[in-house]
Image (tube, rainbow, N blue to C red):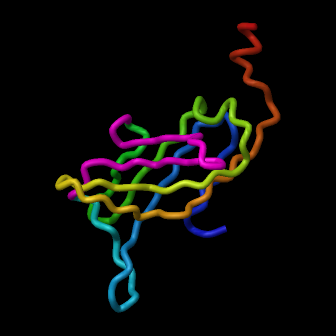
Amino acid sequence: MDKTTINLYRGDDEECIVRLFEKQLDKSLKPFDLSDMARFDLWATVRNKSVLTLSSTTGEIEVVDAPGGVLKITFSHSLTKDATWSQADYDLQAVSNKGRVKTPIQGGRINLKFDVTPDMTEARNG
């Protein structure tokens, strides 16, 4: 697994801290400054069908440290509780205040491990 892989457990609430970097001309890395970013969107697909969408506009993606390039991504249990897929491809796109688009994570993967315990809220209500 590489640094763009996210591991989730189906039906769980998960938070993921992501640190973004930009490659410099001399091949060194520096934190991707998020200070000028208006929004972030993460889309995950399975066979070209969208299975997850998260955004800073709806609160699932939050800037923790703008100059340091740090985001917090929150996966609500409701996003995966009925999922039947085990792997999805994703990317993370940033849109600046001037409308410029940058995709700092390309070709990411989400691994979803299936749960064993049934959703007890539904079992109690059923």
Percent x, y of residue 49 = 60, 43
Horizontal arrangement in the rendering, residue 95 relative to residue 97 (left or right): right
**Residue ranking furthest to the left:** 98
Horizontal arrangement in the rendering, residue 107 relative to residue 115 (left or right): left
Q: Quadrant of the C terminus?
A: top right
Q: Is residue 17 magenta?
A: no
* Depicted 33 relative to depicted 117: above or below: below
* Depicted 56 relative to depicted 27: above or below: above
Q: Is residue 48 magenta?
A: yes
Q: Main secondary structure of the magenta part?
A: strand
Q: Residue at x 80, y 30 (%)?
A: 117
Which is more toward the observer, 81 or 43? 43
The number of numbered discs placed on residues in the rendered structure image is: 0
Residue 28: image quadrant is bottom left
Q: Residue at x 23, y 58 (%)?
A: 35
**Residue ranking furthest to the front:** 48
Q: Residue at x 67, y 34 (%)?
A: 11
Residue 84: image quadrant is top right
Q: Which residues are magenta?
A: 36-58
**Residue ranking furthest to the top:** 126
Q: Quadrant of the N terminus?
A: bottom right
Percent x, y of residue 65 = 32, 57
Q: Residue at x 52, y 46 (%)?
A: 15
Percent x, y of residue 85 = 72, 43
* Depicted 77 relative to depicted 27: above or below: above
Residue 80: image quadrant is top right
**Residue ranking furthest to the bottom:** 26
Percent x, y of residue 118 = 78, 26
